[in-house]
């Protein structure tokens, strides 16, 4: 997947938005103002995704292209190198997992507002 394909997939999530709170390069994806992904459009494309701590460790032990989250809480975030041994299907699953972790922790009222 390339930046545009990943961006489109991220924004297809219910209530997903993006902004640039850190600088003009780092695009942060949010649901109800809570981050679930970060990405920069660059040649060596990678994406930071929230992850269950146990699952994060498992993924890092299996896939060379998954590391502890760069500039993030290493317990709850992974950095996935796009085009590595992580195929597009797994990347989408990890995006879904990240989004669901954040969405499911939202207060019921916020989830209801998202539809």
Image: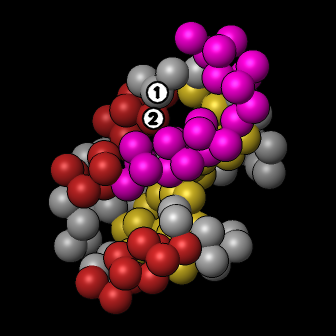
Q: In which quarter of the view is residue 59 placed?
A: bottom left
Quick check: marks 2 and 1 in contact, CB under 8 Å?
Answer: yes
From the viewer's perspective, tell me whether residue 93 is left or right of residue 113. Answer: left
Relative to 98, is 85 above or below?
A: below
Residue 37 at least partly seen? yes
Say whether residue 105 is magenta.
yes
Q: CA distance from mark 2 to mark 1?
A: 6 Å
Q: Residue furthest bottom?
A: 61
Q: Is residue 115 left or right of residue 88?
A: right
Q: Position of residue 33 (x, y in %)?
A: 76, 33
In the rendered image, which quarter is residue 68 located in? bottom right
Q: Which residue is mark 2?
A: 10
Coloring basis for residues: secondary structure
Q: Where does residue 29 sit, x and y in percent of width and height?
A: 61, 39
Q: Is residue 21 magenta?
A: no
Disc 2 versus disc 1: nearer the observer = 1
Instruction: Tell me the residue at 59%/37% (across/down).
Output: 103
Residue 86 x/y as whole percent: 24, 66
Q: Residue at x 31, y 46 (%)?
A: 92
At 57% from the left edge and 27% from the top edge, which residue is drawn? Answer: 16
Dot 2: element: helix
Q: Quadrant of the C terminus?
A: top right
**What residue is shown with label 1?**
13
Secondary structure under tag 1 reads loop
Q: Residues within 10 Å of mark 2 (few under 14, many from 20)?
A: many
Name the residue at 52% across, 65% down.
52
> In the image, is residue 1 above or below residue 32?
below
- Magenta stretch? 94-115
Residue 100, labelled with which disc?
none
Vertical position of residue 2 compared to residue 13: above or below:
below
Judge left or right: residue 81 versus residue 15: left
């Amino acid at each position: 997947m390339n930046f545009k394909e990943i961006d489109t997939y991220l924004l297809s999530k219910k209530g997903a938005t993006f902004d640039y709170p850190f600088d003009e390069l780092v695009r942060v994806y949010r649901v109800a103002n809570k981050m679930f992904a970060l990405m920069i459009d660059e040649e060596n494309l990678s994406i930071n995704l929230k992850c269950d701590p146990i699952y994060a460790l498992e993924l890092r032990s299996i896939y060379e292209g998954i590391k502890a989250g760069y500039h993030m809480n290493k317990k709850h975030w992974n950095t996935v190198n796009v085009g590595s041994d992580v195929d597009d299907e797994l990347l989408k699953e990890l995006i879904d997992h990240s989004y669901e972790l954040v969405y499911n922790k939202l207060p019921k009222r916020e989830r209801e507002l998202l539809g």
